[in-house]
Structures are given as C-alpha cells and as structure tokens.
C-alpha cells in the first residue's frame, strides 16, 4: 500500500474527524486535542494549517486510495533551534501495522529537507508506544535517549523517547 502526503483541504474535515475520534489514538498524543473529535474541530485544524507560515509549519493529510487516513505535521522550533523541526503524526487504527505510517514519515522528511533549511527533525513518542518508536526507526531516525518523567498523560507520569533524523542522513 502506497500512501501520499497531500496539502490539507477543508473538504477533508469529515474524514479527519471520523478517523481521529478514537481514544486509542488520543492516548498516544499530547493533550489539548478535543475528544470526541468533531468535523468542526477538523475544520478548525485544517484552517489553521492552511493559514500557517509554510516556512514554519509543514502539515499534510495522509491519503490512501483517495481517502484521508491520518495526519503528519512538523513545526519549526525557535531561537538556536530554528533549523530543527518537531514531527508529530497519527494514522487511523484500521491502518496500523501495515507500514503506511513509516512511508508517510519518510515522504514528510524528504519534503522538509528538500523544501526548507531544516537540518534536523525530531520526535518524542511516549516510551510505552513501541509502534510509534518502530515507525521512526524504520524511517531512519536514530534513538538518542530516554527523557525520564518527561510528561503527564491521563494522570500518569511518563517517559518519552527522543529520536532524530538529520538532513545528511537522507539518501
């Protein structure tokens, strides 16, 4: 299965809400995202991504056979980290374990490195999220270490893992 990363369109809001209203997905992401996730929430997110500075925010829908099945986004950091971007992503549960997310992450990194001055992309999945860590490893990211007691999610203090990919490591 080959996915595509595509610029967001407002018409994707309904599909975004359908795939994103899943507690299993929310439990693996940072707080601040509404649950359940509605079409109106999707419209707000897509509008914000379309209005964002394209040099600082890289945001794409993940599509497969014309359907929106996930999201991949990276945000440029600031100050001395201004040539670094933080990556975040999710994919609808029915597509887990098929290698699709790895392919989307690879496409995203290629896009960022080819179209910006970003030198380093990093991600910080929760340490318990072995599938997300595996996505990053299969996409060529290097494990840099564990950020101990780095987050509080669902009332639990959690470790996070730090992964990064350098522009010089892309083939």
Image (spheres, grey):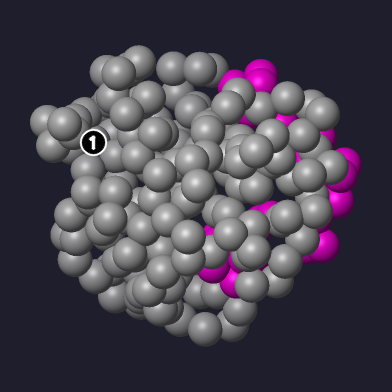
Is residue 101 in sight in this rendering? yes
User: Going 24% across and 70% down the picture, which residue do you hit?
Assistant: 146
| Image x and y of residue 11, in percent | 82, 29
Q: Above or below — where is 65 with respect to 90?
A: above
Residue 49 within the magenta-colored segment of the rendering: yes
Q: Above or below — where is 53 with respect to 77?
A: above
User: Going 61% across and 41% down the picture, which residue do you hit?
Assistant: 64
Residue 7 in which image quadrant: top right
User: Going 58% across and 54% down the picture, which residue do you hit?
Assistant: 91
| Image x and y of residue 118, in percent | 28, 25
- Say which residue label 1 marks: 120
Question: Circle 1: is it few (<14), some (14-19), or many (20+) Cα within 10 Å?
Answer: many
Number of marks drawn: 1
| Highlighted magenta segment, given as a residue range | 25-52
Which residue is farthest bottom?
Answer: 156
Q: Name the image quarter holding the C terminus.
A: top left
User: Looking at the image, which is closer to me, 24 or 93?
Assistant: 93
Horizontal side of 119 relative to 75 (left or right) equals left
Residue 14 within the magenta-colored segment of the rendering: no
User: Going 48% across and 66% down the picture, which residue do you hit?
Assistant: 97
């Amino acid at each position: 299965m080959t996915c595509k990363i595509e610029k967001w369109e407002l018409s994707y809001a309904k599909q975004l809400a359908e795939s994103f209203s899943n507690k299993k997905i929310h439990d693996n992401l940072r707080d601040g995202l509404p649950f359940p996730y509605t079409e109106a929430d999707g419209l707000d997110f897509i509008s914000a991504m379309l209005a964002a500075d394209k040099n600082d925010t890289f945001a794409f829908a993940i599509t497969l056979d014309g359907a929106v099945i996930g999201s991949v986004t990276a945000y440029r950091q600031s100050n001395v980290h201004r040539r670094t971007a933080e990556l975040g992503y999710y994919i609808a549960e029915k597509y887990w374990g098929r290698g699709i997310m790895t392919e989307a992450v690879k496409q995203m990194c290629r896009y960022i490195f080819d179209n910006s001055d970003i030198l380093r992309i990093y991600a910080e999945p929760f340490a318990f999220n072995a599938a997300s860590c595996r996505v990053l490893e299969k996409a060529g990211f290097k494990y840099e270490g564990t950020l101990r007691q780095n987050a509080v999610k669902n009332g639990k203090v959690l470790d996070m893992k730090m992964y990064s990919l350098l522009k010089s490591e892309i083939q």
